[in-house]
Image: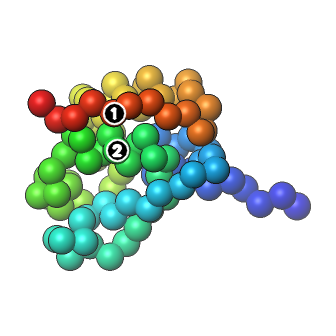
């Protein structure tokens, strides 16, 4: 039996060769749990939210996905292959 591939916590696509581990609640705010994410998803999370905002939002990825910027990103990246990478725009 082939093991089921891990999926990204943010976009739910299968993970590729590179996997990063994200703290939904930042370590600086007492977070201990980590979740697997694509590098592009990880950069998008941190380009969109401050550590204080991430701490307030909590550990549920669904809450992040309701933010308009993240919802647009997830819709866009959902059609990309697992190892897709592109430059990530910084928070304005």
Q: Nearer the viewer, residue 34 or 66?
A: 34
Q: Position of residue 47 (x, y in %)?
A: 24, 41
The answer to whether 57 appears left or right of 20 in the picture is left
Q: Which residue is mark 1?
A: 88
Label 2 crowd bin: few (<14), some (14–19), many (20+), radius 10 Å: some
Task: Give coordinates of residue 62: x percent, y percent.
Answer: 35, 46
Label 1 crowd bin: few (<14), some (14–19), many (20+), radius 10 Å: some
| Element under disc 1 | loop
Residue found at the far front of this picture: 87
In the picture, measured across the screen, residue 26 lies left or right of residue 15, that is left
> Which quadrant of the structure image shows residue 43?
top left
**How far, Cα to Cα, is label 2 from label 1?**
7 Å
Q: Disc 2, disc 1: CB below 8 Å?
A: yes
Quadrant in which the C terminus appears: top left
Name the residue at 18% across, 71% down.
28
Q: Is residue 72 above or below residue 7?
A: above
Above or below for 90 versus 3: above
**What residue would you read off at disc 2?**
43
Instruction: Look at the picture and state if 72 lies above or below 9.
Output: above
């Amino acid at each position: 039996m082939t093991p089921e591939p891990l999926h990204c916590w943010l976009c739910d696509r299968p993970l590729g060769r590179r996997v990063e581990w994200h703290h939904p609640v930042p370590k600086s705010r007492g977070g201990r749990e980590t979740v697997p994410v694509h590098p592009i998803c990880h950069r998008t999370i941190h380009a969109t939210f401050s550590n204080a905002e991430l701490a307030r939002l909590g550990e549920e990825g669904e809450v992040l996905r309701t933010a308009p910027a993240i919802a647009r990103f997830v819709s866009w990246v959902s059609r990309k292959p697992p190892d897709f990478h592109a430059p990530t725009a910084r928070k304005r």
